Amino acid sequence: MMPLVLIASKDPDFFLVFGHILSVAGFETRLITADKEIARAIKAEAPLAVILDCQPGDRAVAKLCLSLKSSEATSAAPLAGLVAPRSGKLHLDLIKAGVDEIFSRPFAPEQLLTWLHGKAGAARLARQTKAGDLVQGDFRLDRQTHRTFFKQKEIVMPPIEFRLLRSLLAQPGKVLSREELVATAWPEHAAATDIRGVDVHIARLRKRLRASVGSDVIRTVRSAGYAFAPDW
């Protein structure tokens, strides 16, 4: 069975172009034109990923992304925003909303295919082993109770650190910028939060994890951000 990719767009030409690219690469595609149908399709079909057509001035797409990432039933579905030229601050709005990847058009189709085979596939493997759980290696995060376990032993941490770790574990190896982590840890105050505050909380989280794991599982990428990169 070919992996399913949902394409959310109101532009038939957009679907024809990207649907053809993905079909040739071995993916099944489906066009969804109504925003309210996307969550239903994710729940029913468990797609590999959802591609969002992001047009200039379209504020609804960021709201849609935030809605999908805020719901337990749809948050695990990887979302990629394909952003049209001259879209202004839509990139930042999507990051704050929790989008998994952004591609600025025009771009080489291979970039999208690489993401689908790699990042989205990894995110799919990291989905719940039971309702609410996120698992990477010996880590298990219970999203419903906000509890963290390493090799079945609980690591007690405050909510901000839990949200930071959840974002890092959900995309292992990917470098998340401070802006992305702010949007994750302080979603209701992202615009007003000093992004350098992330460094303080990451330092505390890193120290807490090192005490339980015995090694550093968070990698700092200078001027870029942080990544979950355990030496396993």
Image: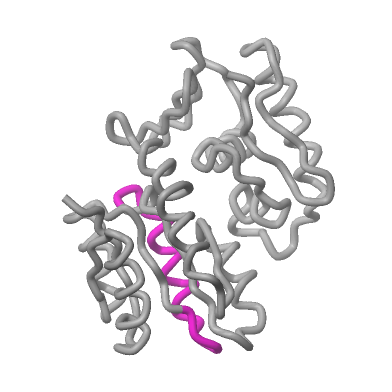
Which one is nearer the viewer's eye here, 59 or 56? 56
Residue interval drawn in magenta = 54-73
- The quadrant where residue 161 appears: top right
Residue name at image x 38 percent, y 48 percent: 76
Q: How many labels does the image show?
A: 0
Which one is nearer the viewer's eye here, 5 or 17? 17
Which one is nearer the viewer's eye here, 161 or 127? 127
Is 222 above or below relative to 66?
A: above
Residue name at image x 77 percent, y 42 percent: 221
Is 213 displayed left or right of 45 in the figure?
Answer: right
**Magenta stretch holds residue 67:** yes
Residue name at image x 30 percent, y 29 percent: 129
Judging from the image, the colouring scheme is: one colour
Is 158 above or below relative to 195?
A: above
Q: Where is residue 100 in the image (x, y as percent from the top left)?
A: 51, 56
User: Given the current orientation, which residue lies at the most extreme front position?
Assistant: 24
Q: Looking at the figure, which quarter contains the C terminus?
A: top right
Q: Position of residue 219 (x, y in %)?
A: 72, 33
Which one is nearer the viewer's eye here, 211 or 86? 86
Is 148 displayed left or right of 12 in the figure?
Answer: right
Is 75 above or below relative to 54?
A: above
Is 127 displayed left or right of 92 in the figure?
Answer: left
